[in-house]
Amino acid sequence: MKSFDTSSAVESGTVAGNKVDDDGGEKRTGTLMTASAHIITAVIGSGVLSLAWAIAQLGWVAGTVLLVSFAVVVNYTSRMLADCYRSPDAGTRNNTYMDVVRAYLGGRKVQLCGLAQYGSLVGMTIGYTITASISLVAIGKANCFHDKGHGAKCSVSNYPAMAAFGIIQIVLSQIPNFHKLSFLSIIAADTLSSSPPENIVMKKASLVGVSTATAFYILCACMGYATFGSQAPGDLLTDFGFYEPYWLIDFANACIAVHLIGAYQVIAQPIFQFVEKKCNKAWPESNFITKEHSMNIPLLGKCRINFFRLVWRTIYVIFSTVIAMIFPFFNAVLGLIGAVAFWPLTVYFPVEMHISQKKIKKYTMRWIGLKLLVLVCLIVSLLAAVGSIVGLISSVKAYKPFHNLD
């Protein structure tokens, strides 16, 4: 399941727009509605397709209680994170998660935040490659089952689909400022104004977004479980919990694949820019790294090409694609990514920054309560991670790399 991690949405919701603002930066034009929509689309992903399976393992009561409990915790910590956007309270904007951690915690915690954040993003690009390929393969299987019968042996390899997805990402990754393209929010997932105060709007948006996502999660989980019971498949669409109407399965899987094409770039762009900024700073006089070249490309016209960007981004996409080919296990990979990212980014850092910001004294009741929240969430995350790793190991034992999963 895609974790209730709104930290990236909170951060993205405060990125600048395209006009001059009162602080000399770019004007922020986002509203409560656009911020809420961004959170909803950032949190809800193809992981919802495995929720029926998760409820089948946990049962009605435990599964629903866990979903609601996660939602409450995430909304609570997201409010803390929103309050940290400016430091001090009405001062300098912190435009990235690492900027916020640097302002309130500093030291090695900034590096730990970066490791958790970018590690999570790398894992998500791998997970998106796996998910997109599985959806594309499911389209071929659905058509095969429709033509030959539900009992037919319809074997379709994931690897051509992964390779095709990777090639598309190599092309898209070369578009300068891809993250600023207006159509991206339509297919893949937006900027808050400074009045009313960003933290107030973001708190409301977080409540709307998390509440909507939770309601959607519970509906998907419980309706899927009610339909399939203990036999609920790991993925409702690609594990064929149902076969007909086949065109509906095709359409749904195609929508997932299209969404993930854009979503991959949304997730990968911070990774690309982080490395490129570091290299530009380290070697500012290197033409290979810094120089932009104008080239005429057939059908596309004039395009700006940077050789370092071309090489580095291509290598990264190939890396994520190859790793996805080696470990093409949907539920285990998705669960591990969610477990690893949830605790540090959604609980630990927001709570620690809140304690620092509000100057909460050690061993007071509030301090103890917050520390207990962090500990409990750590235990839950570790258990979830262990479960995902065990599932991954068992899958790997019975799997030969670069052979069909069938």
Image: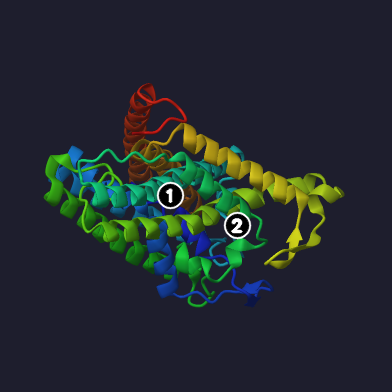
**Residue at the spot of label 2:** 172
First-in-chain label (2 vs 1)? 1
Q: Is residue 348 left or right of residue 384?
A: right
Q: Quadrant of the C terminus?
A: top left
**Residue found at x 29% / y 63%:** 212
**Residue found at x 18% / y 51%:** 224
List x then y, in percent, for residue 389: 37, 29
Q: Quadrant of residue 38?
A: bottom left
Label 1, residues with CA under 10 Å away: few <14, some 14-19, many ≥20: many
Q: Nearer the viewer, residue 271 or 347?
A: 271
**Residue at the spot of label 1:** 132
Label 2, residues with CA under 10 Å away: few <14, some 14-19, many ≥20: some
**Residue found at x 48% / y 36%:** 325
Q: Nearer the viewer, residue 341 or 343?
A: 341
Question: What amino acid type is highlighted by mark number 1?
Answer: Ala
> Which residue, as the protein is rendered here, is positioned at the far right?
285
Residues under numbered marks 2 and 1 in contact, where contact means CB atoms less than 8 Å apart: no
Task: Inspect this view and state whether residue 30 appears.
Answer: yes
Q: Is residue 128 left or right of residue 253?
A: right
List x then y, in percent, for residue 217: 26, 55
Q: Is residue 243 left or right of residue 294?
A: left
List x then y, in percent, for residue 131: 41, 46
Question: Element under label 2?
Answer: helix
